Amino acid sequence: MTHDQIIDWKLAVIRGEVEAEMTPEMATYLEAHADLQQEFDFIENVYAKHEVQEQAPSATMDANFYQMLSRAQAQGQKHQETRQQEQGKKDWFQLFKQWWLSPRPVAQFAALGLVFALGFNLNTGPESTAEPELASLQHEVASLNTMLALNLLERSSASERLSGVAYSKVSELTNPVLQQKLTNLIKNDSSTSVRLAVLNRLALLQDIQPYADILMELSADNDNALMQFSAVRILLGSDNKTIQKRLNELAKDENLNPDIKALILAKNQQTFA
Amino acid sequence: MNLMYKTLVAVACLGITSASSVFAADKNYSLTLSNPGQPAKVEVELHRGELTVIGYDGSTIEIKAEMKDREESEQTKHAKKIQKQVKKSWNKHKQPERSTEGLKAVKNVTVNLEIEEDNNEVEISSMSMNQYVHLTLMVPYNTAVESEVFQGGGIEVKDVSGELELQAYQGGIKAMNVTGPIVAETQTQDVVIELNEFNSETPTSLTSHLGNIDITLGAKVAANINVQTFQGEIFSGLDSEFMAVENVDRRDKSRRQKIVLGGTMQAKVNGGGQDLSLTTYMGNLYIRKAK
C-alpha cells in the first residue's frame, strides 16, 4: 500500500468509478498517515470549490477545453504573427499536452480540475472571444503552470525537478516564489543537471538583473566549469552596463579559469570592433 | 525519506576478522520489503567503494558487501604521501610518534554498513573513510535507485526499469538494459548508458564534467536528444540530424522577444518525445543506435 495507490483510489471514487467504501487495509494506512488525510481534504476542496465533484471530467468537457484552447490560440495569432511566436506557442501546447497525458499526484490533479472547470465555464457561456477574456485565460493558464512548476521543483526526484524547470518555461517568472525557488535550486541542488537546466531557463529572460548576483557568484566559481561557463554566457548576453562592468572586473582576477577569462575578453573585443 | 517515519529494520555492523581472510570479507543480507511485489526505492551512499545494482525477478533486496583491498592508484599514493607529511608537520610541536616496535599492524576488515527500510524505501550507507566497500545489490526489476559514491570506484546498474539518480565523484557510471528516467553525473570518468526502452514520463539528463558520455538507444526509443559540450566533440550514429535549438521568450509584458540561438543542439528520434539531455564540459558525446 502506497500514498499513490490511495490517492488513485480517491480520485476514482470522485470520478464515480469505484465504491466509496474503504478497505480495512486502506483505513489503517490512512490512519497512520495524517499527511494523506490532508491531501484528501485538498482534493475534496478543489472539487467543492469548482463544483465538479459530481462530474467526471468527461470527453465533452475535455473537447470543450481543447476547443476553447484552440480559439485562444487563433485569437492570439491575430496579435502575434511572427514565426518565432508560433513556434513558442507550439512548444507550449506540446508541453501542456504532455502534462495533460501524464498522470501526476495531487497538486497537478488540482491544476487539472481547475483547468477543466475553467474550460467548462467558458464554453457554456455565450460565444465570445473578447480580448479581456483571452488575457484572463492566458493569465490563468500561466498561473496554473507556475503552480505546477513550483510543485515539481520541490520533489525529491531530480528528474521531476527537471520537469518543473521545463514547466517554468511556460510560467510567469515574475512570481517571487518561483524566482526564489529557482535561485535556491541554482545554489543548492545536488544535481548539476537540474542547476544547468535552470540556467538554460534563465538564458531566455529579457532582464536577468534579479539573478545577477547569483550568476556572478557562479562565474567566479572555478570548481564547476559547466556552471561557470553557462553563467558567464548568460551574463555576456545582457546589455546591462553594470553587469558588463562586473564581468570585466572578474576577468582581471588572476585565479579565474583562463577559458572564462578568454570568453569575457573575446566578447569585449567583439563589442568594441 | 522522513526520519520521523523511518523504521530501522537492520543496522549491520558486521565484524569479520579471520586469519584466512585478511584482505577481504564478504557479508550477505537478504532484506524483505514491507510491501513485497510493490515498486521499491533504494538509496545508497558509499563514502569509498563501488556499487553494482542488478535487477532480478524477485521481491527481496539481496545485499552483498565485500571489503576490497584495492590497488592504490598513483594519485592515491601521492595524496597519502602528502597527508602523511601534513600530519607530521602538525605533530611537530606535539607528542612524538608512539613506538610500534614489537607490534604488528592489524588490518581493519569490519564491514560497516547501515540498512534501513520503511514502506519499500530502503537506505543503505557505508560512510567509513578507510574502507573500500564493493556493494552488490540484487533488486526487483521495478526499483528506483538513488546513489552517490564519493571516493573510489563507480556505479554499475543492469536490468532495472525504475528511475535512476546516480552520482559518482571519482568513478564512472555504467547502466545497461535500463529504461530511465535517469539523472546521472560524473566528474572525471565516463557515463555509459544503454537504453533499450525510454520512460517518457519525466526528463533524462546525463552530465559529465571531464569524462565522455556514451549512449546507445534502442530502436523504439522516441526522444528529443539535446546535446551540449563546451570543449568536446559530438559523434552521432542517429539517422536524425542535430539542429541548433532556437529558444524564444515571448512572455515579456513589453512585447519584446528574446531569441537564443545555439548553445544546445537537438535531434528528434522517432518523431521526438521526452527530453534526453547530454552535457559535458571537456568530454566527447557518443550517440549510438542499438544493433
Image (cartoon, helix red, strand yellow):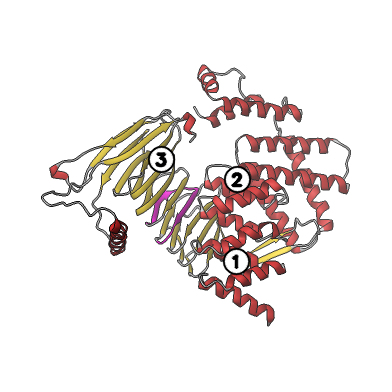
Taking B190 as reference, is A220 left or right?
Answer: right
Question: Mark 1 or mark 2, which has the lower sequence index?
Answer: 2
Tag 3 subunit: B
Residue A127 is inside the magenta segment: no
Taking A150 as reference, is B10 left or right?
Answer: left
Residue B150, given in percent of the width and then of the height, sits at 39, 52
Query: How many residues crowd around disc 1 within 10 Å: few (fewer than 14), some, or many (20 or more)?
Result: many
Element at label 3: loop
**Alpha carbons under labels 2 and 3: distance apart:** 27 Å
Which residue corresponds to mark 2?
Answer: A153
> Which amino acid type corresponds to the residue marked 3 in the rendered image?
Tyr
Q: What is the magenta range?
A: B171-188
Which mark is on residue A232? 1
Tag 1 subunit: A
Residue B30 position (above or below residue B252): above
> Which amino acid type corresponds to the residue marked 1 in the rendered image?
Val
Residue plotted at (56% across, 66% down): A229
Residue B115, given in percent of the width and then of the height, sits at 36, 36
Residue A255 position (above or below residue B122): below
Tag 2 subunit: A
- On the same chain: label 2 and label 3? no
**Alpha carbons under labels 1 and 2: distance apart:** 24 Å
Name the outermost residue toward the bottom: A273
Query: Quadrant of residue A227 in the image?
Result: bottom right
Which residue corresponds to mark 3?
Answer: B141
Query: How many residues crowd around disc 3 within 10 Å: few (fewer than 14), some, or many (20 or more)?
Result: many
In this view, the mark in front (2 or 3): 2
Q: Quick one: B282 or A117, which is closer to the camera?
A: B282
Q: Provide the major secondary structure of the magenta segment.
A: strand
Q: Quick one: A49 or A260, which is closer to the camera?
A: A260
Q: How many marks?
A: 3
